[in-house]
Image (cartoon, grey):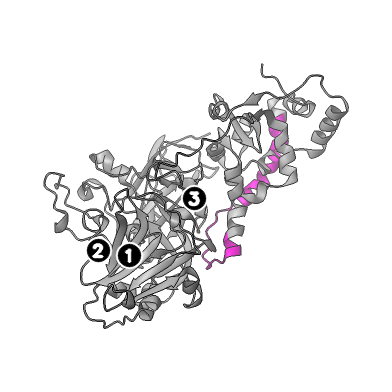
């Protein structure tokens, strides 16, 4: 029998389970309002995005779903303070102790401000479902930093009802090994699914990814090829080679302040996707080489900075500059040999004002975070993420593509019969624009879904296409492809020119079958009427890139 601490906790926990459920369910209406699907199509500004992030707080936070009769709790607490239990004190736990409590079977523990809390009883009451388990076995602070609605005196009072201990003050975080080139990498949000620690590559849980049209910075997928460089913004300089070569007289050097003051600030909402998004489905057909990305190596943000076109014009280039065919980008991230990350795009794409290629210093209204290229990165709308070079240090113009490994010997697609013994990377062009894509983020594969009273289920996801092609339709099947429904689309309306951002979609429909197991499928259509292939095998390739086949999710159905 677990020892309970504090008379107020004893009062709450002495109630029968039905009594506790009745008291705690008063929160559902509040949380359901906060959990309303966040997918406005209006062009965001900083305050709007932050408001959207905050009101999505019910995803992981504890606050509103713990609300019950406040007066009873306060009376019980006052009684305890007036009649304390002699010798009652809280045990001390290490972080490793807390990490052992990540499941309902082991108990769900979390920490906050040096204290330990057991919230097991409330997991099933959470309006966000089992998403609260993302915080299990760890600290609440990273989640409450995202969903600040829970940082209130009232919520903190409620949390105290579930205190079971304190963290050992001698249990310090590990001191980084400064000889490790990755030791100065930034901290990351614990909810991310890590596909590689060094270099760091991670994606958010899909069901969280599509809660917001604009992806919060902390949840934006992370794709690094090398250690994250530490750059002093006051000393930072971007070098642009002029039309007459790399000699010092021909170079334009710009500080971060120059970029912010000499050129008009331009803002654009752009979805970035890794070429390896959904690689795990290709691996299921036949093993491939590459990070095991799920469906969330894609995110959407509002980027702001100077147009690359404006900077190139200032450096002396024009649309008619002779022999200007490719624009090279070189990052400040490098390996132990000093080799830096690099990529290139066409000069024509860079100079076309409608393409809105940016030298971005802001992400969602804030300075770009370290993981995403601080202090400056390239944003190439509609183009594979690999060309959106981070920690940008140098720009040059050439008759040839970048000679970088990542331009010449990676991020290319091949025939399904090509293997590592026969592959010739020179035979295939570098990936630039990406094909039409869609995926189901809710429900998850293997999940049990319960239809509502009208036998309807809700399915959510995202859709996007490269090169500015707008998503015009998403088809969803609830019976393995026999019949189809058209989903409702959410997102930015296409303006003159291109559509760079994804569409979120949602379908509420009745199940057409009484089966206890069903396969849900989605497929998107873009403004050029490009469609997705129905299976993975015909588009399989040895690098596992460009998987845009129909997305399938197998679920169980529970009917009351």
Sequence order check: which comes first, mark 3 or mark 1?
3
Of badges 2 and 3, nearer the viewer stands: 2
Of 30 and 1, the residue lying toward us: 1
Q: Specify start and end residues of the magenta stretch as a single range.
A: 20-49
Q: Which residue is mark 2?
A: 402
Task: Tell me which label, 2 or 1, sits earlier in the chain.
Answer: 1
Overall secondary structure of the magenta section? helix
Tell me the element at label 1: strand
At label 2, counting other C-alpha atoms closer than 10 Å, the crowd grade (few under 14, some 14-19, many 20 or more) is many
- Residue 418 located left or right of residue 72: left
| Above or below, comparing residue 387 to residue 511 in the picture | below
Task: Give the x, y percent position of residue 142.
Answer: 57, 44
Question: What is the distance, in whole Å, between disc 2 and disc 1 at their CAs?
Answer: 8 Å
Q: Residue furthest front?
A: 248
Q: Position of residue 102 (x, y in %)?
A: 53, 30
Kindly indicate whether the residue at mark 3 contacts the one at mark 2 (C-beta within 8 angstroms).
Answer: no
The residue sitting at 26% across, 81% down in the picture is 321
Q: Quadrant of the N terminus?
A: top right
Tag shown at residue 329: 1
> Dot 3: what SS?
helix
Would you place residue 224 above or below residue 173 in this image?
below
Residue at the extreme top: 1
Residue carrying label 3: 219
Q: Check residue 246 in the rendering and tell me which mark sits there, or answer none.
A: none
Of badges 3 and 1, the one in the foreground is 1
Is residue 205 shown left or right of residue 465?
A: right
**Mark 2 or 3 closer to N-term?**
3
């Amino acid at each position: 029998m677990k020892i309970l601490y504090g008379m107020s906790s004893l009062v709450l926990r002495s109630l029968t389970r039905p009594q506790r459920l009745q008291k705690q369910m008063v929160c559902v209406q509040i949380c359901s309002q906060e959990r309303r699907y966040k997918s406005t199509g209006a062009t965001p500004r900083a305050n709007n995005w932050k408001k959207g992030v905050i009101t999505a707080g019910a995803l992981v936070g504890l606050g509103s779903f713990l609300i019950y009769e406040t007066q009873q709790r306060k009376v019980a607490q006052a009684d305890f303070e007036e009649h304390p239990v002699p010798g009652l004190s809280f045990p001390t736990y290490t972080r490793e102790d807390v990490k052992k409590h990540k499941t309902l079977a082991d108990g769900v523990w979390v920490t906050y401000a040096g204290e330990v809390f057991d919230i097991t009883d409330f997991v099933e009451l959470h309006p966000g479902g089992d998403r609260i388990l993302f915080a299990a076995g760890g600290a609440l602070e990273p989640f409450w930093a995202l969903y600040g609605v829970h940082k209130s005196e009232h919520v903190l009072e409620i949390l105290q009802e579930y205190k079971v201990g304190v963290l050992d003050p001698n249990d310090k975080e590990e001191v980084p090994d400064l000889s490790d080139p990755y030791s100065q990498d930034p901290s990351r949000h614990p909810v991310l699914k890590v596909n590689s620690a060094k270099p760091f590559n991670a994606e958010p849980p899909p069901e969280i990814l599509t809660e917001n049209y604009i992806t919060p910075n902390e949840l934006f997928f992370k794709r690094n090829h090398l250690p994250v460089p530490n750059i002093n913004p006051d000393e930072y300089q971007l070098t642009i080679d002029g039309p007459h070569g790399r000699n010092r007289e021909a170079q334009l050097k710009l500080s971060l302040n120059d970029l912010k003051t000499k050129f008009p600030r331009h803002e654009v909402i752009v979805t970035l996707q890794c070429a390896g998004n959904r690689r795990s489905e290709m691996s299921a057909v036949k093993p491939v080489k590459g990070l095991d990305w799920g469906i969330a190596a894609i995110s959407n943000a509002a980027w702001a900075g100077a147009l690359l076109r404006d900077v190139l014009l200032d450096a002396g280039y024009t649309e008619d500059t002779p022999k200007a065919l490719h624009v090279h980008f070189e990052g400040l991230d490098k390996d132990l040999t000093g080799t830096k990350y690099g990529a290139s795009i066409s000069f024509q794409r860079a100079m076309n004002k409608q393409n809105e290629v940016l030298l971005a210093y802001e992400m969602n209204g804030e300075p770009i975070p370290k993981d995403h290229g601080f202090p400056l990165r390239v944003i190439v709308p509609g183009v594979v993420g690999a060309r959106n070079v981070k920690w940008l240090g140098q720009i040059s113009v050439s008759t040839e593509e970048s000679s970088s490994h990542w331009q010449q010997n990676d991020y290319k697609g091949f025939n399904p019969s090509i293997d590592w013994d026969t592959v010739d990377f020179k035979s295939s062009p570098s990936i630039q624009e990406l094909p039409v894509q869609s995926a189901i983020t809710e429900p998850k594969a293997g999940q049990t879904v319960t239809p509502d009273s009208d036998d309807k289920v809700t399915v959510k996801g995202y859709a996007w296409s490269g090169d500015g092609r707008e998503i015009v339709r998403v088809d969803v099947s609830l019976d393995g492809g026999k019949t189809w429904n058209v989903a409702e689309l959410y997102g930015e309306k296409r303006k003159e020119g291109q559509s760079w951002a994804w569409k979120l979609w949602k379908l509420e429909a009745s199940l057409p079958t009484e089966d206890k197991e069903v396969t849900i499928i989605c497929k998107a259509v873009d403004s050029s009427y490009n469609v997705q292939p129905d299976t993975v095998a015909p588009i399989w390739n040895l690098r596992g890139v460009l998987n845009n086949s129909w997305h399938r999710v197998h679920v169980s159905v529970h009917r009351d």
